[in-house]
Image (spheres, rainbow, N blue to C red):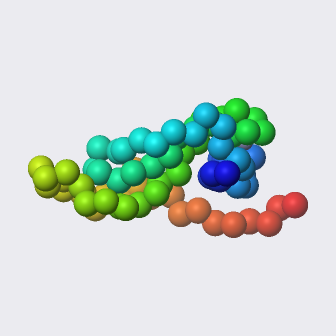
Amino acid sequence: MTQGYCVKCKEKQEFVNARDDVMRNGRRCIRGACAVCGTGMFKIRGLLEKPPAENVVIPIVSTPDSGSTRRTDSTT
Ligand SMILES: [Zn+2]
């Protein structure tokens, strides 16, 4: 079975309704939903094949919220 990371469960979960998809930058991914909570999630499969002839430029951009430094506080 295919597993992906569910942001709601905050752990790996099985996919349901998993299907292949290709992102705009040519990367292949799997889209589906979390088997536990049903939250939509996807998993990047990486470039298993070369992107289409029309060369896709993958812009190297940092995440939009790059300003916020995430720290792991153990509050529990
Ligand atoms: Zn989930």
Q: Which residue lies furthest to the left in this view?
A: 54
Figure quadrant of the C terminus? bottom right
Q: Is residue 15 left or right of residue 59?
A: right
Instruction: Note whether residue 11 is visible.
Output: yes
**Quadrant in the picture for residue 75:** bottom right
Instruction: Note whether residue 65 is visible.
Output: no
Most foreground residue, 30 or 74: 30
Quadrant of the displayed image that contains ligand 1: top right
Q: How many marks?
A: 0
- Residue drawn at x 46%, y 57% is 45
- Residue drawn at x 51%, y 39% is 19
Most foreground residue, 34 or 51: 51
In x, y percent, where is residue 51? 24, 55
- Residue drawn at x 65%, y 43% is 15
In x, y percent, where is residue 48? 37, 61
In x, y percent, where is residue 21? 42, 41
Q: Is residue 37 left or right of residue 57?
A: right
Q: In the displayed structure, would residue 74 be above or below residue 40?
A: below
Q: Is residue 22 left or right of residue 33?
A: left
- Residue drawn at x 41%, y 55% is 63
**Quadrant in the picture for residue 55:** bottom left
Q: In the displayed structure, would residue 76 be above or below residue 8?
A: below
Q: Which residue lies furthest to the right in this view?
A: 76
Q: In the displayed structure, would residue 54 be above or below residue 69?
A: above
